[in-house]
Image (spheres, grey):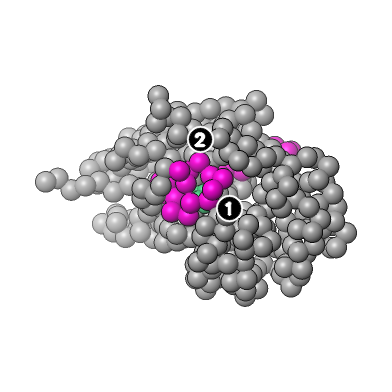
Amino acid sequence: MPNEKKNIFSLTLQELEESLSKFHKFRAKQIYNWLYTKYEDNFDNMLNLPKELREYLKENFTTKLVDMVKFEESKDGSVKYLFRTKDNYTYESVFLKMKEDKYTLCLSSQIGCKVGCSFCLTAKGGFIRNLDSGEMVYQVFFIKKIQNIPSNKAVNIVYMGMGEPLDNLENTKKCIEILKDNNGLDISVRRQTISTSGLAPKIKKLGELNLGVQLAISLHAVDDELRTELMPINKAYNIESIINEIANFPIDNRKRVMFEYLMIDGLNDGLDSAKKLVALLNKIKAKVNLIYFNPHEGSKYKRPSKEKVESFREYLLKKGLLCTIRESKGLDISAACGQLREREKTL
Ligand code: SF4
């Protein structure tokens, strides 16, 4: 059987150098440069490489293990992409156009998810498998290329698409390393945010790795009963266990841990919840991001009023807790992650 070709997007620079040990070491940097600053994925077009190396690359490596099969564009310029893997599974990424010409790329880390949050469409399809680091990195390569984002233009990365990144920590860690390499995409760890449902032992592990990335926690509730209803994972790792881990998490002095809080009408949008939230985050360098719940077909929860969300925010600010309300980007295409994938399945 012929050797299986390696996905070049899954290799760190050091691994690529090692794989090309019979060539000059600087050749790996040139390849990284072609891939990640010129967005060139055809080895034949990497013209400053000797022919012998280009042939070697074609025989042993591939850039074609993932295809983009569908996209949807929002009125605000955000775009959701659906990718298909070689083993015929699909996953999504979202390109978000923020204010002042800033871009955020929301990446998936798994196909499906084990966590099972009750408000999430991805959860409904169950868990299929982890994405490998190359499948994760490809999302950034592809979106930067198709959106014509110059290589020196900084983008923000959030690991907030399909899946729980801390449940796929090894590949997520490698993806972070590949994205941050200054011979390639050069995306600083400060611009990369891992968003977790709160797997307390994995938060600890992430802290020990000390990667320097930002951390966001999907908290969504201030008492365990409601949080368990919204996120059954709370039975295993309750609010207290998460807060205890965060208190020990290494944070860049200038940064804060982001607590995502999904506001649901009549359930967690009152001032009593705001008070509890302030008390809970009392000893943590925290900021809170309030998110309007957007009901999808069949959902039993409702969107809260603007007044309620704003008075919740004002209360937090008055108590000295930084708080933002999430900009509703790509609402017309992405009320929940996993939507595009769900629709593809029904075509
Ligand atoms: S919200 Fe995130 S963690 Fe929860 S089930 Fe969906 S993908 Fe998984």
- The image quadrant that residue 257 belongs to is bottom right
Q: Is 80 on the left-hand or right-hand side of 129?
A: right
Q: What residue type is disc 1 on? A: Leu
Where is residue 334? Give x, y as percent.
58, 35
The residue singled out by tag 2 in the image is 339
Q: Where in the figure is residue 265, as x and y percent of width and height? A: 72, 44
Judging depth in this view, the residue of 94 and 2 nearest the camera is 94
Rounded to the nearest whole Å, what is the CA distance between mark 2 and mark 1?
19 Å
Up/down of 307 relative to 238, above or below: above
Magenta residue check for 28: no
Badge 2 amino acid: Gln
Mark on residue 142? none
Q: Where is 10 relative to 95, above or below? A: below
| Disc 1 residue: CB within 8 Å of ligand 1 | no
Q: Residue 109 magenta-drawn?
A: yes
Tag 1 residue = 230
